[in-house]
Amino acid sequence: MGSFEVFEHTADAGVIAEGRTLPEVFVEAAKGMYSLMVSLPTVRPDLRREVDAEGNDLEHLLTNWLLELLMLTETEGLVFSEFHVSIADGKLHGVAGGESLDEARHDPQAVVKGVTRHLLSVEPADGGYRARVIFDL
Amino acid sequence: MTDWRKVLERVDEYRWELPVTYKAGMLVPARVYADEALLDVLLEEQALEQVANVAMLPGIVWRSLAMPDIHWGYGFPIGGVAAMRVADGVISPGGVGFDINCGTRILKTNLTYDEVAPRMVELVNQLFRDVPAGLGGKGPLTLDDAELDQVMLRGSSWMVEQGYGWPDDIEVTESRGALAGADPGAVSARARLRGHSQLGTLGAGNHFLEVQALDEVYDRQVADAFGLGEPGQVLIFFHCGSRGFGHQVCQDYLDVMETASTRYGISLPDKQLACAPINSDEGRSYIGAMNAAANYAWANRQYIAYWVRRSFAKVFDRSAEEMGMHMLYDVAHNIAKIEKHVFEGNEIEVCVHRKGATRAFPAGHPEVPERYRSVGQPVLIPGDMGRYSFLCVGLEQAMHETWGSTCHGAGRIRSRHEAKRVLKGVDVARRLAEAGIIVRAHNRSALAEEASEAYKDVANVVSVLDSAGIARRVARMRPLGVIKG
């Protein structure tokens, strides 16, 4: 099982995600991002959305995956708590489970507005992978 | 960690310089505006390293500039100004920021504190309903593609033609609320998708809409020129930008610029500084898309102003005209603009990146609205929701030192988490209510992140630039009602 940890960056915040495999790291990064926005355990994975992303390298792929999710949040008002990711030939296919934002139930926190490239990394670590990404809040 | 005190050279009480020899690759020195106390605060983080990195970008002229509200950003610091020669310089989306044309607007009223205070809860509730904010906030207007093109090309003017404002609003908006050269063709389908239904929304984070009272007037003559009355006069001050539309433009062009930087052989100390020559296909495309996003932001603030007038009219059962709800000014603080400046006796054309910095043109400048031209451009400087905001005016010295620019706000001193920790157990909304400030937020638990404890005292920031002769204090306003995302 992977894990994520939130860290602070003056006006903004970032996530360090770890996992044995790249898909696990990408899943943890997405959970980390939504944990900045809402209380994750309160979000029921009732609705499913499929997402495809590509990138020139792993960092770019991670950025685009997270941006695809943010796009759904912004245009459809959905928040997510469960993710499945597969990566093949540099292409990502993901499934996100969530529901419409409910201010009364989800305890909204910060709003993630963008994914920055500042100090962005996806690297092998401890026999698996570690990713670091900072969000614009 | 660099011992900045050893590296910085004192110019005078309010100016410090980082010599060009600080770091290999710097093309010009860096200059910081701060007094001793603010310098201590800003040296705690590595923002100055970022100021030095900006001094490495091709075509930079004079100095990489840091305002007293500077803090660590991505690539570029927030609170920085850098001008690049159009002839051989670069433009960088990171030097503008994600929220293209994030800015501020003030509307005046002829109402007084005594008239408004008894209705404040009702007024704040009405504004909270009429100006959507927070996560996924959708506006009351959904644009089709042709309408979105008009917003991109014509900004505020198009909104006013649709009935969302007064013709006079355009006169007192920076660049009359629309930059020429916007290119809808340079804007992605994704940006359009995000932009269709976000006009009229505030967003989240440090964005706000406040009902304020004029608190103190420092310069009566200029205050008169700005149409301000006596302390107690009620004003509306709000802060927001181009929302998801501008963010997507930035995000799209970070990709383009990363490739372009390699293509043009520009070596960068940080990926987020990715840039392209101003005179290149990539540079021109970005300018076309950025201008479209800037115009979107002006349209957004114009539409919000329309709703503010409606809210007031509803609550006070009088027309906005009767309440004298004229605009004072609207100014950008995340933007890059091609401007002509005099440098070392010659007129040069530069691309001025103002990232978290406000234009502050002096009296006599043709870009200052005619009605203010004898005193200078109004400069709107928000503080924090518990203390006060300032209205300043641009001074001639700004043209000689800062490309006609000044600070944009207080600047954060505590991270969001740290602010929450310091305020653990404190009900920020209740504390503000006890101080006579009514706050409504979509996210009450995050109010601590925006409390006074999270920010520098904006009075100190403004005072440095007043003393340095860059922008003079005109008036101070205090918050009465606050809407947050």
Image: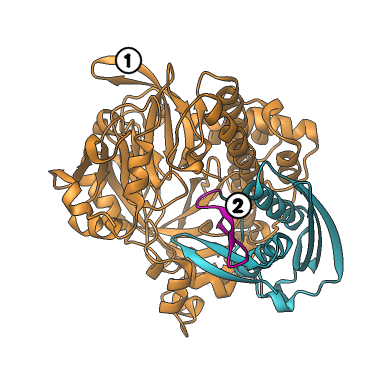
For label 2, the residue is: A115
Q: Quadrant of residue B147?
A: top right
- B430 versus B359 height, above or below: below
Q: Residue at x 59, y 40 (%)?
A: B250
Q: Is residue A46 left or right of residue B174?
A: right
Specify the subunit that label 1 lies on. Answer: B
Q: Is residue B92 magenta?
A: no
Q: Name chain A's colour.
A: cyan
Q: What's the mark number on residue B177?
A: none
Characterize the local packing of mark 2: few (<14), some (14-19) or many (20 or more) Cα atoms within 10 angstroms.
Answer: many
Outermost residue on the bottom side: it is: B425
In what quadrant of the picture does the C terminus of chain B appear?
Answer: bottom right
Specify the subunit that label 2 lies on. Answer: A
Q: Nearer the viewer, residue B216 or B467?
A: B467
Q: Quadrant of residue A96?
A: bottom right
Q: Amino acid at mark 1?
A: Glu
The boundaries of the magenta stretch are A117-137
Q: Residue at x 47, y 75 (%)?
A: B420
- B323 versus A31 height, above or below: above
Outermost residue on the front side: it is: A127
For label 1, the residue is: B347
What percent of the width, then of the height, locates residue B369?
A: 43, 29
In what quadrant of the picture does the N terminus of chain B appear?
Answer: bottom left
Q: Nearer the viewer, residue B263 or B69?
A: B263
